[in-house]
Amino acid sequence: MALFPQAVLSTAYFPPIEYFFAIASGDRVLVEQCEFYQKQSYRNRCRILSGSGPVSLSVPVVRETTLSRPVRDMKVDYGEPWLQVHRRAFDAAYNSSPFYAYYKDDIFAVLDSRPVFLFDLNTKLLLLLLSLVGLKADICFTQEYVKDYGDGDFRDTIHPKHRGVTLLQQYKKEKTYYQVFSDRFDFVPNLSVLDLLCNEGPNAISFLL
């Protein structure tokens, strides 16, 4: 039985593991496309584990003259070399992981397609990652902005600056798994689902159910 009748989520770039737990735990998934864009959130960034520890990778967006724009209208800035930076970071972090080689071509095909809008980039990555993880979900998109959906609204709580417990901690679903560089660092929880996928491969879904 699903924990939530509906999981309401922000758009996200290579979302954290708790984001996929929310999807796995909801009967229906609603991704927000009508809210104003928020900086310094998972909407345009992700966290992976590098040889020097956890690092954040962000996607630059085109700076418009209008201060507040719906997230659906935010354009990716390909004038900056972020694609090369992210490719090198993913390679350095996961080349020695058991499953990265199986997934990287599909992942880079999405990145190299250069969607104009951040929302489209995130959506393409989300659908790919769901497929790679083996998680089936009914993904829908908001048609208007609603301030509060009540239980299952995680747009603000799944956030890199959220100070409370994660969903994984709240529902006692936080599990450890082997991570590259585990000889240097203690286990780092709730990284991008890419970390889980590269290290656990087809077994990744068992960490979400």
Image (tube, helix red, strand yellow):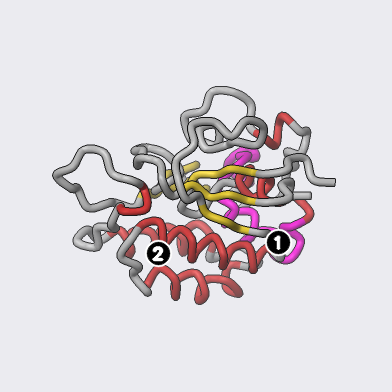
Q: Report the side of 137 relative to 163 (left or right).
A: right
Q: Residue furthest right?
A: 1
Place of residue 111 in the rendered image (x, y in percent of width and height, measured from the top left): 40, 68
Marks 1 and 2: which is nearer the front? Answer: 1
Mark 1 to mark 2 CA distance (whole Å) = 25 Å
Location of residue 158 by image quarter: top right
First of labels 1, 2 by sequence position: 2
Name the amino acid, label 1: Leu
Q: Report the side of 50 relative to 135 (left or right).
A: left
Place of residue 201 in the rendered image (x, y in percent of width and height, measured from the top left): 69, 64
Residue identifier under label 2: 87
Neighbourhood count class around disc 2 (C-alpha, 10 Å): few under 14, some 14–19, many 20 upward: some
The structure residue drawn at horizontal position 37% and vertical position 74%, both measured from the top left corner, is 113
Label 1 SS: loop
Magenta residues span 182-205
Q: Report the side of 71 relative to 183 (left or right).
A: left
The answer to if 17 sits in the magenta stretch is no
Neighbourhood count class around disc 1 (C-alpha, 10 Å): few under 14, some 14–19, many 20 upward: some
Label 2 SS: helix
Where is 113 relative to 191, above or below? Answer: below
Residue 188 seen: yes
Where is 5 relative to 92, above or below? Answer: above
Place of residue 79 in the rendered image (x, y in percent of width and height, measured from the top left): 19, 61
Name the amino acid, label 2: Arg
Location of residue 191 by image quarter: top right
**Looking at the image, which is closer to me, 156 or 42?**
156
Residue identifier under label 1: 135
